[in-house]
Image: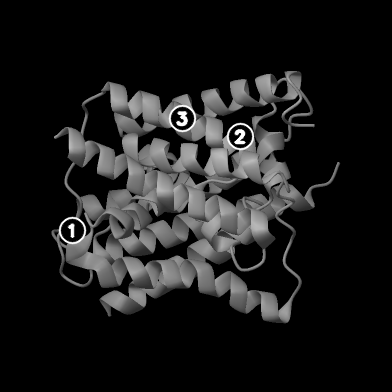
Amino acid sequence: MRNLISLATGALFGIGLVISGMTDTLKVQGFLDLFGAWDPSLMFVMGGAIIPMFIAWRVAEKRSASIVGSPLPSPPNTKLDRPLIIGAILFGMGWALAGFCPGPALASVTFGGTSGIAFIVAMLIGMFGYSAYNKMRA
Amino acid sequence: MDYTSWINALIGGVMIGGAGALFLLGNGRIMGASGIVGGLIDGSGRSNMTERLIFVAGLVGAPALLGLFKTLPSTNATSNLVLVVVAGLLVGIGTRMGSGCTSGHGVCGMSRLSIRSILSTLCYIGAGVITIVIARAIGVLA
């Protein structure tokens, strides 16, 4: 059951990303081009996604466990720190330069050609590198 | 005015949020793409490797399967591989340092009014807007 839910989640997420326009890098860059030819349509993606998710959090509050019986997430961390802010800024820079964020890059990797594959490989190296650097410092 | 892209954005968005809702209520998990993949890459997700791998299989496989039946929209990605690699490294490092991306912070965190997620989303969209302005000014982007 747990695996089936994971598969369905990934599949629905992937198809939703393709339909929404999030896998179109020019559209993403157009959304971020606030001072140019701004394309606001992707705001509807976030708006549309937040509605079912908002309801799901309300439902989760009333439940003691998930459907498969595993614990529900603990209340969110409220600590605002430097890595959160610097990390988000670095992510935003990369998101703008290529027009890809992690989900859409993975959803389009089978039809996005060499650039899409190169982005994923670089992203995975970045993830691995950051974690290796952190472990080395600790 | 072309409303098709707005309607598609809304329908796709509801599907994305529906996926997140399913993952939360079904498995008790937060649907964050960078966190799920990052845990596979750096070993921090060892305790639920299978769940992560199957999620990624669905995320990559479902659009591929759809592509067998209909033409998928182009990603219109730049062919400038240096730019793509720099961007990929920034996204990889940034999402791990900042504990999330558009799905984890933007959709799942914002919808539970997490202060960290709201701040993260403001920062990455703000950085994205400024990056586009600078990249266009210096000719990195057309």
Question: Of the numbered discs in the image, which one, if any, rests on residue A90?
Answer: 3
Q: Nearer the viewer, residue A101 or A15?
A: A101
Q: Residues within 10 Å of mark 3 (few under 14, many from 20)?
A: many
Q: Amino acid at mark 2?
A: Ala
Residue shown at 43%/45% (left/top)? B107
Residue A92 image offset from top left, x and y in percent: 51, 32
Q: CA distance from mark 3 to mark 1?
A: 37 Å
Specify which label sits upstream in the sequence, 2 or 1. Answer: 1
Quarter of the image for the N terminus of chain A: give it: bottom left
Q: Which residue is mark 2?
A: A96
Q: Are marks 2 and 3 in contact (CB under 8 Å)?
A: no
On what subunit does the disc labeled 1 rest? A
* Whether residue A40 can be seen here: no
Q: Amino acid at mark 3?
A: Leu
On what subunit does the disc labeled 2 rest? A
Q: Secondary structure at mark 2?
A: helix
Quarter where residue B41 is shown:
bottom left
